[in-house]
Image (cartoon, rainbow, N blue to C red):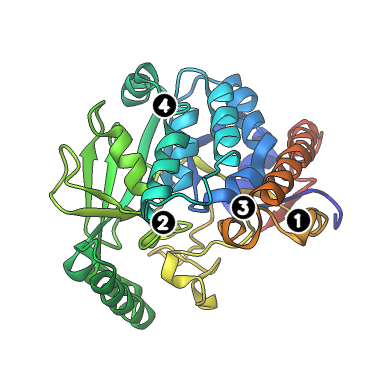
Amino acid sequence: MPNFPLTIIAGATARERLASEGWRPALFTAMVGASGGAKLLGLGYLDRYLFGEYLNRSAHPMELYGSSIGSWRHAALASISPGQAIATLQDRYMKQQWAEDDRRSPSQVVDGLCEWVLDSFLTPDDINHIATNPRFRTHIVTALGLGLNSHQKKSMLALGMAKAATLNMINRQLLARSFQRVVFSTGVSESFVFKDFDTEHIDVNPDNLRSALLASGSIPFLMSGQRDIVGAPDGHYWDGGIIDYHFDFANCAGDGLVLYPHFSDQVVTGWFDKALSWRRNSQRNSNGRPALDNVVIVAPSQAYIAALPYGKIPDRSDFQKMSQATRLTYWRECVSTSQTLADAFIEVIESPDPLRFVAAQ
């Protein structure tokens, strides 16, 4: 359906289960949230419907895996009032502004804005709720810098990042020489068993949750990162998207389906893979089956995106390319228009044919 607002892609196992059981929320035992910064606004009302309505139709346990803005979205889902929290996060993110004569360094400005956004919905009560949530088990993915990537000094970090990009191009596993995956978790990780990198799981508690979320969204050069997080190995922590930009689904485990509300129909494994077309949706498990076999991707369609102002959903470059007034007007329109995505998803799940709008992976 070329003009339908959503692109929905499901692997073979996911299609079979949707066909036989329908769009029951309990089918999904895990959800993934990709890196993407301002792209969260492109999902707008779709996220609000998923968090505030759809997933609340069930009380089954779910695991939430997120990097960068994906981890922030999931913190909203695991908070006391998910629908209100995701709306607050979107609204605060959209309203970021700064004085033109601000004398702070760019990284200090961005650090301050990110803390301002995060604190809008992350109250002390919510922090405790997320850390102990009996239904939503949260996994916040970060990248611990190794060697030169443990430096905040930009010249040293630039050398480290260049080395990491080169090693990653040769073989993704070589990225482990530059970064270690550290996942801050509120429980055991069962839906993803990370085998591709040395991965350390750290227990989330009220003392480290906020720092872990800030670290997961700390883009090198743009932000300062987080250092020596409570309860975690000493060192400098950066954006989890460096390793898990859209995630490597070869690490996917368990029998349940994975719900993936995404910004795109493309799955790019790590941040350095964005220019490497061979590392997109072709991922496979160790048994040779497509890694997206039990995954359902729900994303804005190309037709929907093309009809938006500037023919795209919001992204981080808008901060540099647009005036603050222009950006705010554009972002507000994108969020408002995203009601179309929520309405389309309702049509999908209420259709007598569960696969009517679903494409095969």
Residue with the mark numbered 4 = 122
Percent of width and height locating residue 129: 37, 19
Q: Nearer the viewer, residue 296 or 276?
A: 276
Badge 1 is on which residue?
A: 305
Amino acid type indicated by mark 4: Leu
Q: Residues within 10 Å of mark 2 (few under 14, many from 20)?
A: some
Q: Is residue 322 above or below residue 332?
A: below
Q: CA distance from mark 4 to mark 3?
A: 24 Å
Q: What amino acid type should be assigned to the residue bearing mark 2? A: Pro
Q: Secondary structure at mark 1?
A: helix
Q: Quarter of the image containing the N terminus?
A: bottom right
Q: Could you say where residue 69 lies in the image, as x and y percent from the top left? A: 48, 45
Are the two marked residues, 4 and 1, in contact with CB atoms closer than 8 angstroms?
A: no
User: Tag 4: Cα neighbours inside 10 Å, few (<14), some, or many (≥20)?
Assistant: many
Q: Is residue 189 visible?
A: no
Nearest the camera: 187 or 301? 301
Position of residue 155 in the picture relative to residue 274 (left or right)? left
